[in-house]
Amino acid sequence: MGEVGGRAGQLRSSGLRHGWTTGACATAATKAAYRALLTGAFPDAVVITLPKGQRPGFALAAEELAGGPGGRWAMAGVVKDAGDDPDVTHGALVRSTVRAGEPGAGVVFRAGPGVGTVTKAGLPLPVGEPAINPVPRQMIRDAVAEVAAECGGSGDVVVEVSIDHGEELARSTWNPRLGILGGLSVLGTTGIVVPYSCSAWIDSIRRGVDVARAAGRTHVAGCTGSTSEKVAVAVHGLPEDALLDMGDFAGAVLKYLKRHPVPRLTIAGGFAKLSKLAAGHLDLHSARSQVDQGYLAGLARTGGADEELTAAVAAANTGLEAIQLCRAAGVPLGDLVAEAARATALGVLVGSPVAVDVICIDRAGTVVGRAQPLGP
């Protein structure tokens, strides 16, 4: 066929335009503001480095350099472009205000207006921290270090990220239920928004299967995101054209493979998302399915959890908290979820010669559950 497979091939075949995460926008705004703080001038366009090495440029939509009782500060803003994804934050103005910090403190993060604060356990950030996720934090630290090296700064700064109308926008997300109060989260693991939520992306999954079959692949992996994709490659050594960027559309992968089988399928994804597949959901998007803590509690009980742990899992704030509780107690909840997810997949694939294994990971990419290959 001569087609490119993998994530890049799927995006190309979908005809959809990718966008930039809030984390990428916050990084660009921070880099521009810090440069202005050190040099007195904002860059005409600001270029940042994404985790996979891409270097996009961002135009500034807002800029201000001033001084006050607390010293000089600089603010830059970037309008988020989510591409063709129906993202609630598309068009939002993401601002970063940068001021000098205490010597030796490094980068200190603050939540400005429209950015939430973590108030419950079970998230990848401690309670009380601004809802700026780990990868965007590292991107911002790297950008600050780059500017400091170029412009003679110390790199000790306070970075306050804000999102215009973020508190209002957050009401359309799951943030309030998760205990992220006061606004949105600053998210993103690659810096790039891939437009999943439309029929064109489902069609791109089908084209990805077609490319893999045409290349003679006997093993493909359906992955929920870039981190699980890395894990699938590390575990199985799969080539790019055997990787299916499944996103939330597990059903699209399974139903197409039933009609166009490949001998082996690996499903790799975050524990919370795959717990939805385990419970029988084929659409893993948060707007259409939710983590069922009662279901997880029942699985934990079958895995040996006592009444106290079972109750704690049932009351957990997130899937991440549930898996952390069970791992600490030696209860194999991750494996149980992987096995149940495999059973759901095989139920869809029934009658088709496809063996399935499942890999569950946490947010850091650590494998927390496995189900070995099982076929019809």
Image: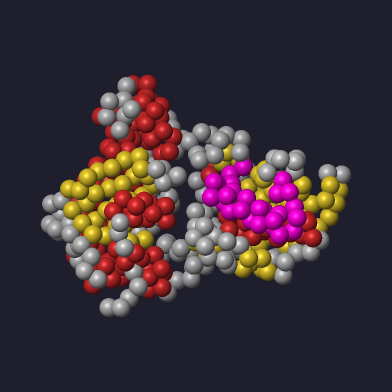
Query: Is 245 a magenta residue?
Result: no
Q: Is residue 247 left or right of residue 95?
A: left
236 or 338, which is in the foreground? Answer: 236
371 vs 41: above or below: above
Quarter of the image for residue 322 reads: top left
185 vs 123: above or below: below
Residue farthest to the bottom?
Answer: 2
Q: Is residue 39 left or right of residue 217?
A: right
249 or 228, which is in the foreground? Answer: 228
134 vs 246: above or below: above
In the rendered image, which quarter contains the N terminus? Answer: bottom left
79 vs 269: above or below: below
Determine the residue positioned at 38% across, 73% down. Answer: 13
Determine the residue positioned at 37% across, 21% down. Answer: 308
Residue 248 at x, y percent in the picture: 37, 55
Quarter of the image for residue 243 reads: bottom left
Say whether residue 341 is visible: yes
Determine the residue positioned at 61% across, 62% down. Answer: 48
Q: Which residues are magenta?
A: 130-156
Please state the total of marks drawn on the protein image: 0
Query: Is 135 a magenta residue?
Result: yes
Say whether residue 178 is visible: no
Image coloring type: secondary structure
Residue 102 at x, y percent in the picture: 75, 40
Magenta stretch prevailing secondary structure = helix
Residue 52 at x, y percent in the picture: 49, 60
Residue 297 at x, y percent in the picture: 33, 31
Determine the residue positioned at 73% across, 63% down. Answer: 62
